[in-house]
Amino acid sequence: MQALVLQEDSAHKLALLDVPTPTPREGEALIAIHYASLNHRDQWCRVGMYPNIRFPSILGSDACGEVVAVGSSADSAWVGKVVILNPNVGWGKHLAYPDYNYTILGMPTAGTLAEYVCVPVDRLIDKPAHLTDEEAATIPLAGLTAYRAVFTKGETQAGANVLITGIGGGVAQFAMLFAKAQGARVFVTSGDDEKLTKIKALGADFTVNYKTQGWEKQLQKQVPLGFDVIIDSAGGEAFGTLAKMLTMGGNLVVYGTTAGTPSPLNLPRLFFSQASVKGSTMGNDVEFVEMVNFINTHQIKPIISSVRPFAQVISAFDEMHEGKQFGKLVIKIK
Ligand SMILES: NC(=O)c1ccc[n+]([C@@H]2O[C@H](COP(=O)([O-])OP(=O)(O)OC[C@H]3O[C@@H](n4cnc5c(N)ncnc54)[C@H](OP(=O)(O)O)[C@@H]3O)[C@@H](O)[C@H]2O)c1
């Protein structure tokens, strides 16, 4: 089969290679992948900015495809179903945090940027019926991360004022779709005015470019008492400002550091307002099922930037590196 392999010595660090098609072991399913989608994690792996990188590895954490075979002791009723995959590998028994040996599908275990992948059948869930295969392929990693950030950590309620930074991001966009479906008022930032225009058309209540001077004042004017929830994946210079923009008892949830080392926090401001800064990573297996149910209940449609053939997959990594995309980058595998 064809697979995108992370390689230490290839020109792009990535190569489309012919590799052996996997055989499902006990309790596993073999999935013929129709579509996969990219996450920033894949690009971080490519540039060596992800922990415990192993070469060679097949990247990719998201997919929609058809179950074509199962191994011994796995329920054969899965065969012929179109599914998406829970990318958690060994979250473990604690709902609040994963086990130390937790990993994510696609490095070190063989991932979804391939014609076939094998995963345990307990990683499978039916594709949401209201979505196309390419839309469904965008859900797993970004949807799970956004769901935990918005609900478990952010505690977003109907009517809450929610600020989401860097709305060009895949996780950020799922966070907005979830918060809007919950009945929150959603404020977003981006470094790109075109992305802000597009997201306004998709339901954002207020938008501001974080590269313009006084962006924080514009937001404070809208919500003078501060935000109930702030969801951030950037860190960087703006982080201390964000922490000052929380209302009494508010939650600032951070799941990434795209913009690097955070600026200092005003600690008295934080503790006098009983506010919290919470780290969040992926989500547990219960949240994965809840997230897919939420998408079904609210008939949520993911935002897609582009769909391209497998032969052009490396150009999707380049686009993600440049941050040009608006929505998920989808790869048509077969
Ligand atoms: N902890 C976890 O479980 C987890 C899970 C998924 C992702 N992440 C991390 O979260 C980050 C986003 O992931 P993704 O897959 O959603 O990436 P993505 O789709 O590539 O989006 C990255 C986005 O970051 C935004 N950004 C860049 N510089 C920014 C700044 N100075 N301030 C605010 N936003 C800025 C950009 O938004 P604009 O274009 O709108 O400016 C860009 O679209 C990555 O760092 C990733 O590693 C963590």
Image (tube, helix red, strand yellow):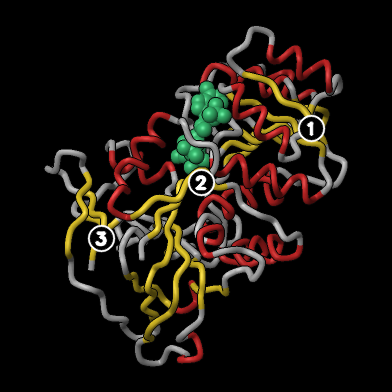
Residue 309 against residue 317 in the figure, above or below: below
The amino acid beneath tag 1 is Asp
Residue 109 screen position, x and y as percent: 31, 62
Q: Given contact means CB atoms under 8 Å apart, are the residues at marks 2 and 3 in contact?
A: no
Looking at the image, which residue is at 51% across and 43% down? 305
Residue 307 screen position, x and y as percent: 45, 50
The amino acid beneath tag 2 is Lys
The amino acid beneath tag 3 is Ala
Residue 294 against residue 230 in the figure, above or below: below
Image quadrant in which you'd find residue 245:
top right
- Looking at marks 2 and 3 on the same chain, the residue that comes earlier in the sequence is marked by 3
Is residue 235 visible in the rendered structure shown here?
no
Residue 205, disc: 1
Callout 1: few (<14), some (14-19), or many (20+) C-alpha neighbours within 10 Å? some
Q: Which residue is mark 2?
A: 328
Separation of disc 2 and disc 3 at Cα?
Answer: 20 Å
Image quadrant in which you'd find residue 206:
top right
Separation of disc 1 and disc 2 at Cα?
Answer: 22 Å
